[in-house]
Image (tube, rainbow, N blue to C red):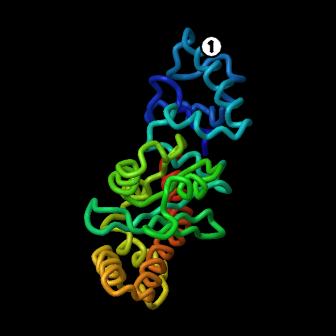
Amino acid sequence: MIKNSFVLLEKIGQNTEKIIWNSGIRTWDDFLQAKEIKKVNPLRKSFYDRQLIKAKQELAKYNSSYFTDKLNSGHHYRLYDHFKEDIRFLDIETSGFYGDITVIGMYNGYDTKTLVRGKNLNRDTIKAAFGDSKLIITFNGASFDLPVINRYFNGIIPNIPHIDLRHVCSKIGLTGGLKNIEKTLKIKRADEVENMNGADAVYLWQQYKSTGNENYLDLLVKYNEEDIINLKQLAEYSINKLWNQIKT
């Protein structure tokens, strides 16, 4: 996806990108090898060539951070295929809307890592959980998860691209919240948390704190794990569908 993308070039939007594609220029290499390109001012082509050469160099270095600002955040999903082995699917739970963070869950596509307030949730463990990840994927994280984390742990989130699947899903007609989208796509959850929602997660934390009963915490962690694990399946479906939608 990323090597087919021209929206990272200055003043190139999706409409112009599509014109470039339709003229037979489908990849960065096609662009660099072409002497002239439809809808691209010849005086700017050498400038764009330098930008693409730099992008190729940074991609070869596996430097996702380079593209954080080069791409509009709505296009960060185009990096998914290239960096999919070094992703952190992320979801948080709080004590209430924009309240204290109770749980941060991260999933690298193979293993989950759960950080719990009062147990192992601190700057060092969050930083270690991010590790050397190259992409962050959330659902509604641009509006909720990441701002809340920044409120309590300012500067802890690495400067890497962030894919908010809420916006990816919206572009392909999937709306109504994560749980409703999962049901539409027949993405299953474990029976014990299948009908839970965010309000239930707040309740479980309150019960855990008031009683000390670890069963409440275990159920909250399970709920959070289902969120982050299911994000992988949702990412695979929604990102590929959106890409196929815009490139045709």
Residue occupying image coordinates x 43% and y 81%: 217
In the image, taking residue 76 as reference, residue 152 lies left or right, namely left
Query: In this figure, which residue is indicated by the disc labeled 1?
Result: 46
Q: Position of residue 146 (x, y in %)?
A: 40, 52
The quarter of the picture where residue 192 lies is bottom left
Is 92 located above or below residue 152 in the figure? below
From the viewer's side, name the closer residue of 26 and 217: 217
Q: Is residue 11 visible?
A: yes
Is 190 located above or below residue 233 in the figure? below
Amino acid type of the residue that numbered disc 1 sits on in the rendered structure: Ser
In the image, taking residue 188 as reference, residue 24 lies left or right, namely right
Q: Is residue 142 visible?
A: no
Is 59 located above or below residue 237 in the figure? above
The quarter of the picture where residue 72 lies is top left
The quarter of the picture where residue 219 lies is bottom left
Q: Position of residue 229 (x, y in %)?
A: 54, 71
Residue occupying image coordinates x 62% and y 62%: 108
Q: In the structure shown, which secondary structural element does the residue marked by tag 1 occupy?
A: helix
Residue occupying image coordinates x 62% and y 17%: 36
Residue occupying image coordinates x 41% and y 60%: 139
Q: Position of residue 242 (x, y in %)?
A: 48, 54
In the image, taking residue 66 as reference, residue 103 lies left or right, namely left
Is 74 located above or below residue 148 in the figure? above
